[in-house]
Amino acid sequence: MSTQKTVRQSADTVEENELRLDQEKAEQIVDALNTELANAYVLYHQLKKHHWVVEGAEFLPLHEFLEEAYEHVEEGADEIAERAQALGGVPVSGPTNLEDRATVEFEGEDVYDVRTMFRNDLEMYGDMIESMRDSIELAENLGDHATAELLRQILVTLEEDGHHFEHYLEDDTLVLEEATKDR
């Protein structure tokens, strides 16, 4: 680690921005964006864990689906972080800060059956969708239409992926009953 001690901007501060958004409003929006960013990385790590440990007859399509889902979350997180920086803020980034800042909770290190993992994922998607809607409303109310639009685009992807988790949890399947019985 570098021994350089020059800090250009302290974490949890918001400087003036060139987007001409009032600093007080920018502070509120950056705060909300950092919550969304922290939530995204908690979900990202849970999805990544599930990608690594998924097993069973549907292993490959689930493994690929989870990879696509965590990539979507990471893309959204990157856009959120860049927007927070553009508004004069410092994106939350350290693992401890992300965990402390998040309003969603990681399921833990244990490995669960696929249905339990997917139910846990779907629950986190739902919590994030609600939070994202609140952040969109905040941005709109403060006149930051660009942040609201960015979050709307991310929300669409979150809702689509969440809906796919819901489909995987349905009772209908092509897998024969014999394939799912204990051996």
Image (cartoon, helix red, strand yellow):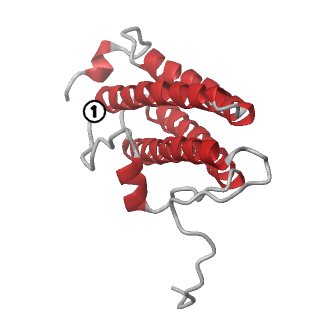
Q: Residue at x 52, y 64 (%)?
A: 11
Q: List the single residue furthest toward the bottom.
A: 3
Image quadrant in which the C terminus is located:
top left
Asked whether residue 161 appears in the rendered view, the answer is no
Q: Residue at x 58, y 22 (%)?
A: 160
Q: Residue at x 55, y 42 (%)?
A: 28
| Residue 67 x/y as whole percent | 54, 41
Residue at the image point whose x is 51% and y is 56% from the top: 92
Secondary element type, mark 1: loop
Left or right placement of residue 153 versus residue 112 in this view: right
**Looking at the image, is 107 positioned above or below residue 9?**
above
Q: Nearer the viewer, residue 108 or 39?
A: 39
Spot occupied by residue 131 in the image (x, y as percentages of width and height): 47, 30
Three-letter code for the amino acid on which mark 1 is drawn: Asp
Task: Return the x and y of residue 34 as percentages of the image width and height.
Answer: 52, 48
> Viewed as shown, does residue 123 lie left or right of 14?
left
On screen, residue 126 versus residue 15, left or right, reads left
Relative to 149, is 121 on the left or the right?
A: left
Q: Is residue 169 above or below residue 31?
A: above
Q: What residue is disc 1 on?
A: 113
